[in-house]
Image (tube, grey):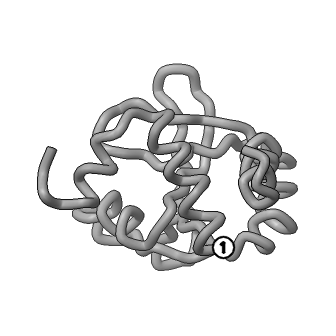
Amino acid sequence: MSDNPLAQILEMDGEERYDYFLDAVVEERELWILVNSDNQFLKIVSEEDGVGYLPVWPSEDFAADYASGSGDLAPKSLSLPDFFKKWVPGLSRDKLEVGVFPGADSELWITGPEALKSDLQDVLSGSF
């Protein structure tokens, strides 16, 4: 483990990062995506199974760290209400999953937008 808190969190496994993500997003009431210079959001299609997903992060720092070296990508904040009202229905309609908090390893927690919304609402209500 390093002295860098960012690195320590990125070294967690996918499930630990998912739990961290839920707590951080509920606390800050926002999550982060990456967009290009045309304001188009980053979508990744898994080479393994062809599943398309929207990667999301709990803070600007983690999103920026993931984008470092890409040149064209910048972090963009989504408020939690905006995510619930606009993004979840849109992602569901487009049949996109959500890749929660990509980290240093290749392990990634991929979930449906409605399932993520439900988990976030559980944390919001204190029943998670």
> Which quadrant: the C terminus?
top right
Residue placed most toward the observer, 47 or 33 = 33
Q: Is residue 93 above or below residue 42?
A: above
Q: Residue at x 76, y 55 (%)?
A: 126
Residue 71 locus on image (x, y percent): 29, 70
State the count of labels: 1
Furthest-top residue in this view: 48
The N terminus lies in quadrant: top left
**Left or right relative to 68: residue 29:** right
Point out residue 119 in the picture as x, y percentages from the top left corner.
74, 46
Tell me residue 14's x, y (percent). 45, 35
**Residue under the point 59% across and 67% down:** 31
* Tag 1 secondary structure: loop
Q: Residues within 10 Å of mark 1 (few under 14, many from 20)?
A: some
Instruction: Tell me what residue is drawn at x 67 percent, y 36 percent.
Output: 111
Is 20 positioned to the left or the right of 68 in the image?
A: right
Where residue 5 appears, x then y in whole percent? 25, 60
Who's the residue at 71% across and 43% down the image?
96
> In the displayed image of the protein, which residue is found farthest to the left?
2
Q: Residue furthest front?
A: 126
Q: Is residue 117 left or right of residue 9?
A: right
| Residue 114, picture quadrant | top right
Height in image: 83 above or below 119? below
Which residue is at the front of the view, 57 or 22? 22
Instruction: Report which residue position mark 1 lands on.
Output: 29
Question: Which amino acid type is shown beneath numbered disc 1?
Answer: Arg
Answer left or right for 26 relative to 109: right
Closer to us: 31 or 28: 28
Residue 63 or residue 16, whichever sits in front: 16
